Image (tube, rainbow, N blue to C red):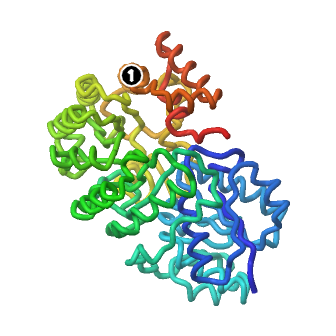
């Protein structure tokens, strides 16, 4: 028995979000290759009418912690219309807190989803939502009467090359594409949920990666690819082989790349390799200008001086650099916040940098710290810890979780606003760089008037000193309108 499966990221429920749902596209391609479930559909934007037209046999929703409350609300709307259709939830959040599976969902897929989803669909196709049968599947949570049962963890897929390229033909594609060439990270930052979700780092082979890049260029006409790995250069020999293949095939003449870096890994040789590959844009998790806070967040694996050196090297090689900073960390003092402000001023990042409140995501060390302080709970309103929801220019509207008690809320927001103004100013300078006004860039911007208006709005508000970090996400991350 074949099943019609509808998948969507909760961020895409009303309209297409800033990010492509590569995870769902991997599920679709895996099911197509390794099962007889070939009737899979990924929905992006205006989901309810599409569900009505599709009439699926199963519905799967992907959600992270910041969108989990919304996912539950949408699930209840869907259940009102499709009471007999099994509803599945997956993603970082439910994988970290499987015992909190809401009644509205029939099953949760925990962790890496490809093999688990394939087996789950096979059981549902033959037996429906049968607790006895579901209990034989590793890596899920489900309801059995009044109890929530969590099965044994499923081993990770060791050979990532056995997973086919994601089904990008089911996604909305633009000339700005994305790729995931590895899963996991060798570092154990206390705020990062990725380590627990993906386990030990695993890598696609250089040949697999380059073949996928060629498909993205040839089939989807991309001109820039964002590499979404936690740390693309973590495996240095692999990175060098990828660079060599890209150079040999002259792919670096046809497309540019962006990726995430770590300051302690940035060297002269690495910058030369990135230039060779045509990596134009990099982002580093700077997090703090205080060495104490940095040691806490990144377990002593990087220093403030390495941050400074990394930025100097990237600038020397004309690599556009931006990064992230976290404030409101455990026991962070006013002096330490000011150290972060001074670091931002010194770095003068091309992309300004973005700041966020320290977020205690479930499954992380920060989460356990916040639970001990009674700041969070497994059943809380998770919209309160949204990474991008904090507008520091509006302290009265703040409804999040502040992990430090070493500074008053009033002083915290005063310093946060100063940091925000500085990052906005550097971002504006970077936006007005001469090389941003190439003929290709101008043609692209002119063809998308909504993005032009967003940029102009940000520039005007920056000049008036009223812009917030929120204004920037529109241009850099929102998908281009067709």
Going 52% across and 39% down the picture, which residue do you hit? 477
Are there few (<14), some (14-19), or many (20+) residues within 10 Å of tag 1?
few
Count of numbered labels shown in the rendering: 1
> In the rendered view, does 3 fall on the left or right side of 212?
right
Going 33% across and 34% down the picture, which residue do you hit? 320
Quadrant of the image containing the C terminus: top right
Going 33% across and 40% down the picture, which residue do you hit? 329
> In the rendered view, does 173 fall on the left or right side of 126?
left
- 263 shown above or below 137: above
> In the rendered view, does 119 fall on the left or right side of 57?
left
Q: Nearer the viewer, residue 286 or 367?
A: 286
Going 27% across and 64% down the picture, which residue do you hit? 238
Asked whether residue 414 appears in the rendered view, the answer is no
> In the rendered view, does 423 fall on the left or right side of 31?
left
- 51 shown above or below 134: above
Quickly name the residue at label 1. 433
Asked whether residue 42 appears in the rendered view, the answer is yes
Residue 221, horizontal then vertical, whole percent: 55, 50
- 36 shown above or below 455: below
Residue 152, horizontal then vertical, whole percent: 47, 82
- 224 shown above or below 446: below
Residue 87, horizontal then vertical, whole percent: 70, 68
The image quarter in which residue 338 lies = top left
Residue 392, horizontal then vertical, whole percent: 46, 26
Quadrant of the image containing the N terminus: bottom right
Secondary structure found at label 1: loop
Q: Nearer the viewer, residue 101 or 476?
A: 476
């Amino acid at each position: 028995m074949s099943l019609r499966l509808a998948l969507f990221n909760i961020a895409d429920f009303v309209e297409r979000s800033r990010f492509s749902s590569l995870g769902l596209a991997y599920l679709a391609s895996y099911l197509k290759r390794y099962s007889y479930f070939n009737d899979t559909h990924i929905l992006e934007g205006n989901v309810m009418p599409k569900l009505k037209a599709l009439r699926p046999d199963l519905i799967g929703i992907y959600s992270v912690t910041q969108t989990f409350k919304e996912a539950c609300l949408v699930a209840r709307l869907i259940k009102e219309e499709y009471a007999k259709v099994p509803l599945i939830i997956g993603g970082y959040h439910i994988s970290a807190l499987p015992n909190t599976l809401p009644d509205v969902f029939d099953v949760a897929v925990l962790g890496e989803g490809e093999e688990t989803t394939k087996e789950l669909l096979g059981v549902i196709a033959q037996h429906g939502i049968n607790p006895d049968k579901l209990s034989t599947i590793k890596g899920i949570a489900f309801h059995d009467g009044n109890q929530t049962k969590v099965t044994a963890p499923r081993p990770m897929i060791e050979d990532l090359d056995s997973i086919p390229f994601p089904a990008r033909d089911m996604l909305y594609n633009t000339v700005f594409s994305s790729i995931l060439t590895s899963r996991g990270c060798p570092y154990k930052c206390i705020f990062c949920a990725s380590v627990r979700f993906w386990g030990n780092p695993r890598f696609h082979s250089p040949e697999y990666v380059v073949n996928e890049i060629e498909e993205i260029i040839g089939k989807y006409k991309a001109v820039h690819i964002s590499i979404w790995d936690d740390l693309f250069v973590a495996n240095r020999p692999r990175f060098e082989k990828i660079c060599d293949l890209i150079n040999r095939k002259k792919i670096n003449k046809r497309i540019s790349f962006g990726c995430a870096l770590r300051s302690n890994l940035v060297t002269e040789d690495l910058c030369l390799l990135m230039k060779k590959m045509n990596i134009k844009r990099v982002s580093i998790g700077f997090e703090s200008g205080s060495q104490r806070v940095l040691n806490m967040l990144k377990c002593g694996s990087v220093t403030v001086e390495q941050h400074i050196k990394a930025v100097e090297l990237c600038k020397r090689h004309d690599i556009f650099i931006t990064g992230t900073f976290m404030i409101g960390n455990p026991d962070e003092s006013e002096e330490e916040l000011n150290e972060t402000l001074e670091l931002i001023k010194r770095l003068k990042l091309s992309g300004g940098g973005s700041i966020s409140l320290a977020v205690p995501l479930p499954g992380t060390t920060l989460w356990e710290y916040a639970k001990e302080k009674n700041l969070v709970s497994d059943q809380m309103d998770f919209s309160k810890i949204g990474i991008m929801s904090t507008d520091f220019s509006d302290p009265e509207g703040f409804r999040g979780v502040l992990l430090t008690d070493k500074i008053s809320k009033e002083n915290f927001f005063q310093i946060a606003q100063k940091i925000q103004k500085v990052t906005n100013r550097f971002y504006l300078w970077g936006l007005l760089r001469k090389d941003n006004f190439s003929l290709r860039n101008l043609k692209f911007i002119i063809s998308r008037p909504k993005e032009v208006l967003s940029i102009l709005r940000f520039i005007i508000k920056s000049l008036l000193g009223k812009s917030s970090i929120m204004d920037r996400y529109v241009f850099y991350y929102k998908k281009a309108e067709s």
